[in-house]
């Protein structure tokens, strides 16, 4: 399973489909009996999902076995995510494993999507031995953004802020370049390249004229460019940098975070990077629609200027939005704090009021 997880990481972090890896194993006969000797395990083939329009990991592994002339009848398939039981652009992976004669399937994480799930049940019903929950924590960590998006029917939202030690994102005169170091900015561009969409408000577009592109260390455009999403009623001016090279520009004339996520879900967006400004960040936090925070903090003091987050309507410390830190990451002179929003604060994302909890999850096959 550790190898299957390693293979899964070769797939893109962005896109509507999850990262999945698969290893096909064969075993030799045990001495003096007919039971497989698990000390004599041979890797028959490997595969991973390389992104939308490519075979799923199980099918990729089966194709690799056929290309090598390897017989996989009676083999064990070790898969990081439950084989899908859904017919989309390709057939269900569970049936592909059955047709190939695989006799045992080992799974890390069961698929939360009601449309694509059921592969384990289908395999068991046809006599295949299925084991689930192997290295489940590692499998969930790999899919920590895709799994909530699949189960909630709305994109996973990362709020990204870059601040001084006293929580400012700009000085009193509005200048903000550069608060953080080049090391931190390169890391932030990598985060953009892993995202499906970058979301900002019309106020940020008017004040900063951002390009919202993902760039490599040498300043070139990254291979994957996320959607550039502008929220608000003011138009994007014809000369704005958002009309330049980069991802597609989407203007959503609304101030409702739930409407924003619903529109992006319809575009098969699974991971949203919310970049600003303070008013939009506060709106998403008030709606309970922020899942995690990436806070790039520089050893700088301003003492005044614009704050990172607008008014949340909080009057007492008991009502504060609490975060659970995952890890501090040193980035040159700066520090990145990655923190998840506590479940109580994020509960609104699954309520009928936001319209996020009742929609079916995204399909695994696209």
Image (tube, helix red, strand yellow):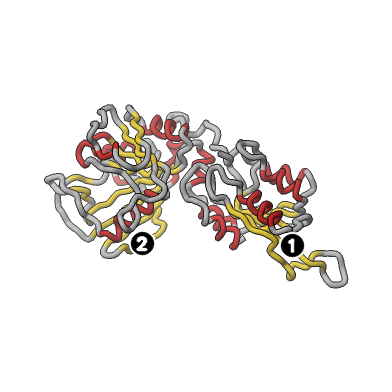
Mark 2 neighbour density, 10 Å: few (under 14) some (14–19) many (20 or more): few
Query: Where is 166 relative to 85, above or below?
Result: below
Q: Position of residue 347 (x, y in %)?
A: 44, 39
- Report the number of numbered marks: 2
Residue 250 versus residue 118: which sits nearer the camera? Answer: 250
Residue 26 has which mark? Answer: 1
Inspect this view and state whether residue 302 appears.
Answer: yes
| Residue identified by numbered label 2 | 329
Outermost residue, left direction?
173
Closer to the camera: disc 1 or disc 2?
1
Inspect this view and state whether residue 323 appears.
Answer: no
Q: CA distance from mark 1 to mark 2?
A: 41 Å
The answer to which image quadrant residue 84 occupies is top right
Residue 133 versus residue 333: which sits nearer the camera? Answer: 333
Give the residue displayed 28% in from the left and 27% down from the top: 233
The answer to which image quadrant residue 122 occupies is top right
Screen quadrant of the N terminus: bottom right
- Which secondary structure, mark 2? strand
Q: Position of residue 112 (x, y in %)?
A: 58, 42
Q: Position of residue 176 (x, y in %)?
A: 19, 49
Q: Position of residue 129 (x, y in %)?
A: 75, 52
The answer to which image quadrant residue 182 occupies is bottom left
Mark 1 neighbour density, 10 Å: few (under 14) some (14–19) many (20 or more): many
- Which secondary structure, mark 1? strand
């Amino acid at each position: 399973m550790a190898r299957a997880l390693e293979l899964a990481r070769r797939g893109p972090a962005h896109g509507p489909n999850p990262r999945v890896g698969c290893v096909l194993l064969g075993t030799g006969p045990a001495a003096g009996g007919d039971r497989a000797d698990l000390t004599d395990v041979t890797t028959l083939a490997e595969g991973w999902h390389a992104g939308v329009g490519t075979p799923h990991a199980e099918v990729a592994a089966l194709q690799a076995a056929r290309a090598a002339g390897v017989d996989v009848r009676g083999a064990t398939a070790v898969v990081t995510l439950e084989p899908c039981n859904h017919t989309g652009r390709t057939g269900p992976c569970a049936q592909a494993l059955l047709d190939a004669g695989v006799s045992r399937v080992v799974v890390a994480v069961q698929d939360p999507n009601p449309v694509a799930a059921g592969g384990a049940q289908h395999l068991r019903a046809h006599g295949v031995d299925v084991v689930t929950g192997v290295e489940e924590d590692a499998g969930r960590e790999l899919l920590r953004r895709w799994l909530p998006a699949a189960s909630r029917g709305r994109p996973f939202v990362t709020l990204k802020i870059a601040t001084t030690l006293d929580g400012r994102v700009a000085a009193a005169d509005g200048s903000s370049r550069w608060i953080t170091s080049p090391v931190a900015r390169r890391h932030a561009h990598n985060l953009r390249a892993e995202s499906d969409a970058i979301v900002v408000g019309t106020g940020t577009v008017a004040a900063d004229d951002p390009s919202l592109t993902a760039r490599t260390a040498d300043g070139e455009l990254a291979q994957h460019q996320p959607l550039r999403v502008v929220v608000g009623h003011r138009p994007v001016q014809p000369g704005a940098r958002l009309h330049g090279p980069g991802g597609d520009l989407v203007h959503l004339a609304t101030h409702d975070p739930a409407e924003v996520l619903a529109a992006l879900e319809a575009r098969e967006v699974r991971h949203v990077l919310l970049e600003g400004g303070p008013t939009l960040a506060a709106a998403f936090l008030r709606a309970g629609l922020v899942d995690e925070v990436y806070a790039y903090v520089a050893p700088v003091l301003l003492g005044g200027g614009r704050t990172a987050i607008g008014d949340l309507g909080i009057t007492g410390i008991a009502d504060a939005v609490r975060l659970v830190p995952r890890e501090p990451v040193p980035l040159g002179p700066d520090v990145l704090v990655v923190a998840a929003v506590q479940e109580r604060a994020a509960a609104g994302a699954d309520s009928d009021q936001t319209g996020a909890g009742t929609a079916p999850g995204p399909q695994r096959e696209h």
